[in-house]
């Protein structure tokens, strides 16, 4: 799975001096700070912030870190950053107690806090890390756990957690559409930008059963898709196909967004004649059955 990244850097040469001149807290000339490697767009943000704060002479003096020498290993090379999608703050011990057994208690696993519901998990092997990344949506008390790659240049508060990989069933497709090619084409319409869908199919690309399984990355800030509209150029017909999600974490029956429930929603939905909310569980949640009963062979 893929994660969002944000670069951070130090100030440019001369930034401190120009800020003091703009704010005029002191008439003392400030020597220029040494240029920082990799510092680009973030410098404008730092410069703007320093100007608004009207920093003193002492506050503008930069601490120079000789971090070009890679002699300090802050974290292992097999690490991820995770966040529990929950409106309430959870202790790291609660998160660890849920995820460690779910991940099979891998040897060498360490979970360390990195902010509210955010944590860094270090693995003893790359195989364990990849297995967690490729696994079904992980949860802490039915609350989704969002994962992305670890980068030492990232700041915890700058990280954006808004993607989650899910297995989705496309229900009742015509036999002619039950192929890897059409599955990927259809799945791209309801997965996040840049996502490469994975289709559960046989070696020859064909799929069998009453539904097609696709693994996609969804945007948790948007409502779950309840179905997909498909137009056939050959038949000149438009069809609607329902979508169902496997092992779906907590989501809102009113607005269809992951991370909160309908009782916590700021925008309660209107119930239909049957008393159901727009994104009710019986519409979106796949039946809890053995996923291999209608096995298509292998995942491609």
Image (cartoon, rainbow, N blue to C red):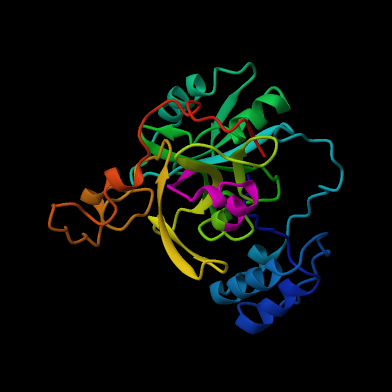
Give the x, y percent position of residue 63: 74, 55
105 in the magenta segment: no
* Along the viewing direction, whichever of 93 and 67 lies nearer the viewer: 93
Is residue 1 shown left or right of residue 136?
right
Name the residue at 34% across, 55% down: 256
* Along the viewing direction, whichever of 51 and 215 lies nearer the viewer: 215
* Quadrant of the rendered image containing residue 79: top right
Q: Residue furthest front?
A: 235
Quadrant where the C terminus sits is top right
Is residue 164 shown left or right of residue 267?
right
Name the residue at 61% across, 52% down: 184
Is residue 252 shown left or right of residue 268?
right
Name the residue at 54% across, 18% down: 104
Residue 168 higher or lower than 182, as above or below: above
Give the x, y percent position of residue 189: 53, 61
Quadrant where the N terminus sits is top right
Give the x, y percent position of residue 141: 35, 32
Residue 234 higher or lower than 185, as above or below: below
* Along the viewing direction, whichever of 84 and 53 lies nearer the viewer: 84
Does any portion of residue 210 appear in the rendered image?
Answer: yes
How many numbered badges does the structure rendering display? 0
Q: Which residues are magenta?
A: 168-185
Does any portion of residue 162 appear in the rendered image?
Answer: no
Give the x, y percent position of residue 114: 54, 41
């Amino acid at each position: 799975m893929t994660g969002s990244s944000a670069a951070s850097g130090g100030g440019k040469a001369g930034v401190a001096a120009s800020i003091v001149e703009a704010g005029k807290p002191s008439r003392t000339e400030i020597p220029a700070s040494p240029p920082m490697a990799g510092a680009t767009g973030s410098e404008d943000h730092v410069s703007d912030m320093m100007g608004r704060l009207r920093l003193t002479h002492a506050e503008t003096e930069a601490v120079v870190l000789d971090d070009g020498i890679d002699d300090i290993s802050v974290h292992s090379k097999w690490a991820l950053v995770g966040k529990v999608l929950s409106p309430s703050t959870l202790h790291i011990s609660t998160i660890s107690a849920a995820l460690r057994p779910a991940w099979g208690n891998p040897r060498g696993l360490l979970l360390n806090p990195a902010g509210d519901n955010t944590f860094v998990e270090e693995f003893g092997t790359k195989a364990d890390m990849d297995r967690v990344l490729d696994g079904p949506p992980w949860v802490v008390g039915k609350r989704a756990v969002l994962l992305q790659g670890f980068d030492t240049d990232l700041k915890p508060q700058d990280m954006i957690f808004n993607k989650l990989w899910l297995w989705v069933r496309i229900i009742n497709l015509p036999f002619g559409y039950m192929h890897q090619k059409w599955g990927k084409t259809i799945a791209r319409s309801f997965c996040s930008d840049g996502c490469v869908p994975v289709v559960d199919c046989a070696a020859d690309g064909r799929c069998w059963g009453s539904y097609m399984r696709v693994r996609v990355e969804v945007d948790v800030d948007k409502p779950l898709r309840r179905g997909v509209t498909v137009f056939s150029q050959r038949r000149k017909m438009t069809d609607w196909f329902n979508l169902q999600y496997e092992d779906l974490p907590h989501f809102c029956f009113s607005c269809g967004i992951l991370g909160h429930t309908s009782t916590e929603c700021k925008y309660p939905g209107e119930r239909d004649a049957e008393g159901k909310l727009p994104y009710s569980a019986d519409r979106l949640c796949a039946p809890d059955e053995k996923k291999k009963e209608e096995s298509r062979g292998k995942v491609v």
